[in-house]
Image (cartoon, rainbow, N blue to C red):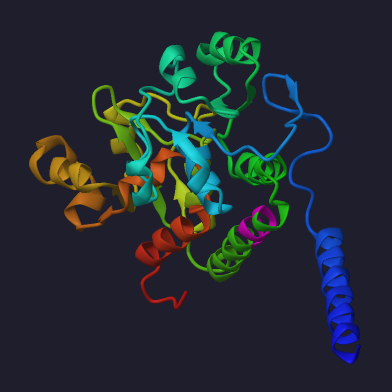
Amino acid sequence: MLFYRKCYSALVIAAISLCQLACTREAPVASTPVTDDFGDTLVVGGAPMRIVSLNPTTTELVYAIGAGARLVGRTSYDAIPAEVRSVPDLGPGLRPNIEAVLAVHPDLILLYASADNRAAAQRFRSSGIATASYKIDRIADMIRVTRLLGRLTGDTAAASRTVDSVTATIKRVRALTANLPHPTVFWPLWDAPLLSVGGGSWLNELIEIAGARNVFAELPQPSPTVAFEELLKRDPDFILGGTTTRRRAATDQRWQALRAVRQNHVLVIDSTIANGPSARVGASAESIARLLHPDVKF
């Protein structure tokens, strides 16, 4: 009898523990409607297990909040993290291949909220698939969408941790560079025509956080076309870019007129930074700050 009483007590304790775990467990998905950047609303009825992300930025965010194993489709441009290469490539993110996406039987589709994707979003919704479209063009957009993805995938705690980590890094880098001299920077995005990072880009935010001033910050567009003659007039202290930018600066005679080129101030950065404001923005700001302010300990 004593043996049975002990077993019964153990079962009761186990049942109480399971109940407590269930009661404290996070709700699996968003229980209230979520509005996306097209103004459409959706309620996910259960934790999505087959996610298609047709925006490299949301793909990175899905991995950042721990839901990467649920991805069953991506764009041809997704490269980070490395394991995303094992996810089926469904083609472009703008005007996607509808049939290819439907063929992998997703229960949640993430799109970039561009006019080019409006028809696709409507088609996916009419097929009964939860579809959310987001325009992630600034750091604040990334923070907002990360929290929304946490609600949609059922892990708001992981989303909050991601946001907290990013914002803490940004705050630290901004504080360390606040009282430093702010050199001027030119960040080319394309050569012909010559496109620069403008004030409307999140990359301009990175420059400012890293303790510098974009020479074309007053232009409101994200990537305005600029005249090379105007660049010569502004004569930045530093040029940011990839290995292609450095090679062009070393071989193009016009670029030799720039002080930054003559002083070997062409700084090579990770070219994938420009893909979009992902969960790496804090680390990206820090890496740029290290290049611009090598004497500061970050």
Whether residue 49 is situated above or below residue 239 in the rendered picture: above
- Residue 190 pos. (x, y %): 29, 30
Residue 186 shows in this picture: no
Residue at the image position 41 percent from the left and 51 percent from the top: 184
Asked where in the image residue 234 lies, by quadrant, the reply is: top left
Instruction: State the residue in front, 3 or 220.
Output: 3
- Residue 201 pos. (x, y %): 51, 36
Residue at the image position 24 percent from the left and 23 percent from the top: 192
Residue at the image position 32 percent from the left and 52 percent from the top: 270
Residue that protrudes farthest toward the front in the picture: 1
Whether residue 48 is situated above or below residue 69 in the rendered picture: above
Q: Which of the image's four quarters has the N terminus?
A: bottom right
Residue 133 shows in this picture: yes
- Residue 123 pos. (x, y %): 58, 9
Q: Is residue 162 magenta?
A: yes
Q: State left or right for residue 203 relative to residue 165.
A: left
Asked where in the image residue 9 lies, by quadrant, the reply is: bottom right
- Chief secondary structure of the magenta span? helix
Q: State left or right for residue 193 relative to residue 74.
A: left
Instruction: State the residue in front, 40 or 288.
Output: 40
- Residue 80 pos. (x, y %): 38, 47
Residue at the image position 68 percent from the left and 46 percent from the top: 150
Instruction: State the residue in front, 188 or 244.
Output: 244
Q: Which residues are magenta?
A: 159-164
Q: Is residue 200 magenta?
A: no
Whether residue 258 is situated above or below residue 26 in the rendered picture: above
Instruction: State the residue in front, 12 or 224.
Output: 12
Asked where in the image residue 19 lies, by quadrant, the reply is: bottom right
